[in-house]
Image (cartoon, grey):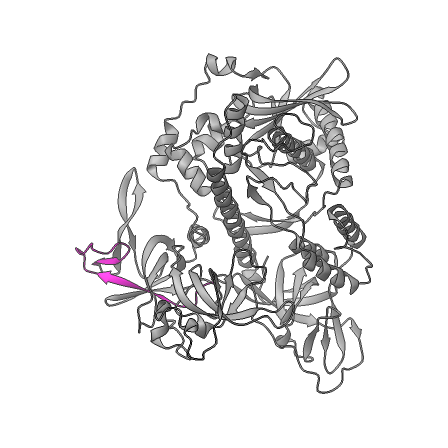
Amino acid sequence: MNKRRKSGNSTNERKGRGGNNSKKSHGKKVYKEVEGTLKMSRDGSAFLIVEGREDDIYIRAAKTRGALNGDKVKVAIKKTASAPGKHAEGDVIAVIERSTKPFIGVLHIVGNQAWVLMQSKFMPYDISIEVKDKDDKSCKGALRRLGHNEYAVTGVYETVDGKKKELQAHLGMKVAAVVDDWPRGANNPVGHLVDVLGELGENDTEMHAILAEYGLPYRFEPEVENAADKISEEITAKDIKERRDFRDTLTFTIDPADAKDFDDALSFRRLANGNYEVGVHIADVSHYVTPGTPVDKEAQSRGTSVYLVDRTVPMLPEKLCNKLCSLRPNEEKLTFSVVFEISPSGKVFNQWIGRTVIKSDHRFNYDQAQDIIEDKESPVSQELKDAVKTLWDLASIFRKRRFAAGAISFERPEMKVEVDEKGKPIAVHQHISKEANWLIEEFMLLANRTVAEFIATAGKMDGKARKNAKTFVYRIHDEPNLEKLQSLRKFAGNFGYKTTVGEGDGNKIARDLNGLLDEAKDKPEFMALEMIALRSMAKACYSTDNIGHYGLAFRFYTHFTSPIRRYPDTMVHRLLAMYLNGAESQNKDYYEQQCVHASEREVIAANAERDSIKYKLVEFMQDKIDQEFDGNISGLTDWGMYVEIDPTKIEGMVALRDIKSDFFEFDEDNYRIRGRRTGKIYHLGDPVRIRVKATNLEQRILDYELIETGIDTAPVPPAGKKRVPRKKRTSSAK
């Protein structure tokens, strides 16, 4: 079993026993104490994440005091940061609250003792699990022996054919466990099982493990499914009478080819005055999902749908997301809409917001809509073709106008992994957005912006926020971090770019950023410049306090257009409906709490999605060990070079210590790697040839080995130059 390290870590330090020892006087130094959340690495060291603090605090493995990943702890800061980019250091002095998030591992049972052998990158210690006799049901989450290598998990159930049944497990299965305590003198933390994920290596098991690691559900409880089944599908005459009727107006959807939940549609009509009426129609989820119901509570808890490589984990049960609320063609659907009158030059004259009923005439996928935009053959009617082309003309005007106003253009290709019916990856490619994607994007942005402005200006739509504006859920994005922008400017200077990015007001920064990225486009360093620029940006989130959206260059913005997959959009629909009916402003504190929760769930879902891609990329490369590929250097650090191989752009790491031809070290000032003996240099973007050396599915890591070396040479550095210390490697597949 993986036991806790003994060095410098006596048992009386477990779980914060002894309280605030650092505060005792008797001539001892008094250290500043802070509270935060622990983020642990595989080697047992950790960082303390403190809300509102820019830099994290490093904690050595011997000073974690029994705290584990995700725990809320108190830390005494023993050493301040010595230089910019360095971390303060501290010691854990108390565990305030244990995390309830599970750790994932493999069940190992010997006699009357069981362990979960850790496979988590956040957890270096195996977890001890109790094994009880068959009839001893005293401990929830403990194992009960049923027979030879057959165990029940006490009090943890699954539903089979509508009936609850205790989960069963056996040796070697992948499980999820929560730590309860780390008793004084014990070698391992003690915990209980919360789920049995399945047989090791099976696709469903591994995807469930990723979800479980982030505390994400992968099934609905029967009471939620039953509540969804009872929701009426009937659209009554009263429903229609209370809504604006668009059933006879040309309407269509444009979505990915594999989409099932169509939550937005566009309608198009030419007006007698030469302008266009364009409707943005969004599934009226709030009509079906009412506050406080089992479906609503579950949706609020989940916060968002989660999109793994091979599956969608929906926010709403299937009846709602794929049937009742999905704007499928030739079916009457209830919607919440923003309708615009727009001139051919892209000027918006009027807007109307309210509940509607529609009947979609056609379902396009993005490729089909793109064919129309590119004047390729299409089997649809001329009326539909004209509508798509006209809407694209308008969208292109909106897009140009938005970037001219200071919107920032990040166009990173999206990694797509194709899998077979068993979930095995069979192809990897990069997806790049085209005009059809931008068409939908621009009209969704317009609708979101209009709804936010309507509330923030108290219905005046004059661009002026009102102090008496009612409580609302905004999507906000703060200005970028100036210190990080200065780092970007220095980094860009290594490649000869003369930029003033980071100077001036927000609009100038946006212009400088766009100018830098435009100048670097199609050059080897572009991806690294764009990544550093992205990291300088603040994180967008939800809030009841509107500060605008910097990245989009909008003073007012919300999320209104995806209520099937985002709970904040459902909240926006509810608030909007209430205010349109004359309701007073709603409780700000309540909605702010909901905003914080939704923002947290969004980050968790994004991390799970990213991990599923990493897992499948490593799995895709498993049968390519010892194969050689051409690629380009995509990143440089003091411990290795990262290489993206052609044509898939799958990234792996070449460790500097594994390059045998020379002793290589990272020249941070010039952002390059140089051989100490030969002076051989590697720059970002240089073409190289690699061999696939190793894959690690559990850690989602790809190791490459350099085949061809050297592009340029430089004078050999003077003898005695110290090598830059190497840090612990990080996950390399992305």
Residue placed most toward the observer, 162 or 22:
22
Residue 494 falls left or right of residue 259: right
Quadrant where the N terminus is found in the figure? bottom left
| Residue occupying image coordinates x 58% and y 31% | 469
* Residue 218 falls in image quadrant: top left
Q: Is residue 672 magenta?
A: no
Determine the main secondary structure of the stretch shown in magenta: loop
Q: Nearer the viewer, residue 223 or 29?
A: 29
The image shows a total of numbered marks equal to 0
- Residue 304 visible here: no
Q: Is residue 141 magenta?
A: yes
Give the side of residue 100 with respect to residue 428, left or right.
left
Rendering coords of residue 18 (x, y %): 35, 71
Residue 444 percent location from the top left of the image:
64, 33
Q: Residue furthest left?
A: 135
What's the residue at 76%, 29% (across, down)? Answer: 393
Q: Residue at x 75, y 45 (%)?
A: 507
Residue 340 visible in the displayed image: yes
Q: Position of residue 230 (x, y in %)?
A: 36, 26
- In-image side of 726 versus 381 (left or right): left
Q: Quadrant of the C terminus?
A: bottom right
The stretch of residues the image draws in magenta is 121-146
Furthest residue in direction front, as rendered: 26
